[in-house]
Image: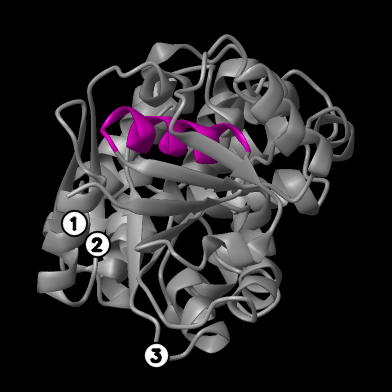
Amino acid sequence: MNETVGIVGAGAWGTALAQALASSGHRALLWARSVELAAAIQRERRNDMYLPGVDLHPALVATTDPAALDPCAALLLVTPAQAMRAVLGDLVRFLTTPRPLVLCAKGIEQASGRWLSEVAVDVAPGWPVAILTGPTFADEVARGLPTAVTLACADAGLGRALAGLLGSERFRPYWSDDPIGAQVGGAVKNVLAVACGIAQGRRLGENARAAVITRGYAEMRRFGLACGAQAETLAGLSGLGDLVLTCGSTRSRNTSLGIAIGEGESLADVLAGRRTVAEGAHTAPILLQRADALGIDMPITRAVNAILYDHAPVDAAIAALLARPFRPEE
């Protein structure tokens, strides 16, 4: 049965998800904070600010009215990770009953160090929460190219129901009962993509990139298991799959940020010139804090954080990684 699904956040990813839902027969209600952006989407049937070149489906409707989301069967929250608490807090006041919240951002809240699922429970207690994550470029999803994702929910029945609601022939959710593992993968891979970008910006070669991906995955696995994640989740779409995509393409916002840093630009200058958010830059310090608190060694993450926030010279940080003692592979 076709349903009305709300998508909160009209950036590239939110618009792509709305397009996928509308194309599969649902009414996709896309909430935007900007009146101008919502009006442009309705008038031009495009979102050229964030997702240029995509003609939007007629069943995709843009709005700035939070109360318009009340009939929705589920809400997909596609705001930046650091804005999710405030946006969700504003929205729930206009909604009469709880319904599933599907969190589509990747990261850890800097102010609290909490997973986004924990933030959602703080803001909307009693509302079911699921995580949608995995290897996705927004423009490919919007153009209907085949995509597989993880849909993680502690309630297996709800996870299956949401997979049926959100899935289609070209957008395939695989459900999981491990929301922590799904969030670990999404958060850590962004930091590792910055590291891959730095290596690329310094012209260190493809061997080095492969080493960063592989040893970075070892960091992800150590950290995830210490947080209670399942090893199978980390080896799946939300972990290894997303890591391979994000680290393997200059289209990744995090990789491209790393490339700019590796080429000598400052973090402030790179961020100032962007409309979109590279979550890895925000996640690195809080990820390192959590790892240190758990006693987990994450040397690549530490090097990225040192370069971004401690003014460590890129070459010195790379030299420190290469000077680490030889050890068994894990």
> Which callout, 2 or 3, points at the residue further toward the start of the chain?
3
Q: Nearer the viewer, residue 132 or 72?
A: 72
Image coordinates for residue 179, horizontal then vertical, percent: 29, 68
Q: CA distance from mark 2 to mark 1?
A: 9 Å
Residue 83 image-quadrant placement: bottom right
Q: Is residue 211 visible?
A: no
Residue depicted at 74% across the width and 18% down the height? 263
Of circles 2 and 3, the one toward us is 3
| Disc 1 secondary structure class | helix
Q: CA distance from mark 1 to mark 3?
A: 25 Å
The reply to whether the C-beta atoms of the residues labelled 2 and 1 are less than 8 Å apart is yes
Q: Nearer the viewer, residue 91 or 312?
A: 91
Image coordinates for residue 34, horizontal then vertical, percent: 79, 44
**Image height of 131 relative to 254, above or below:** below
Q: Is residue 294 left or right of residue 230?
A: right
| Mark 3 crowd level (few <14, some 14–19, many ≥20, 10 Å Cα) | few
Q: Which residue is mark 3?
A: 126
> Which callout, 2 or 1, points at the residue further toward the start of the chain?
2
Image coordinates for residue 208, horizontal then vertical, percent: 43, 22
Residue 233 - label: 1
Residue 237 in magenta?
no
Q: Which residue is mark 2?
A: 152
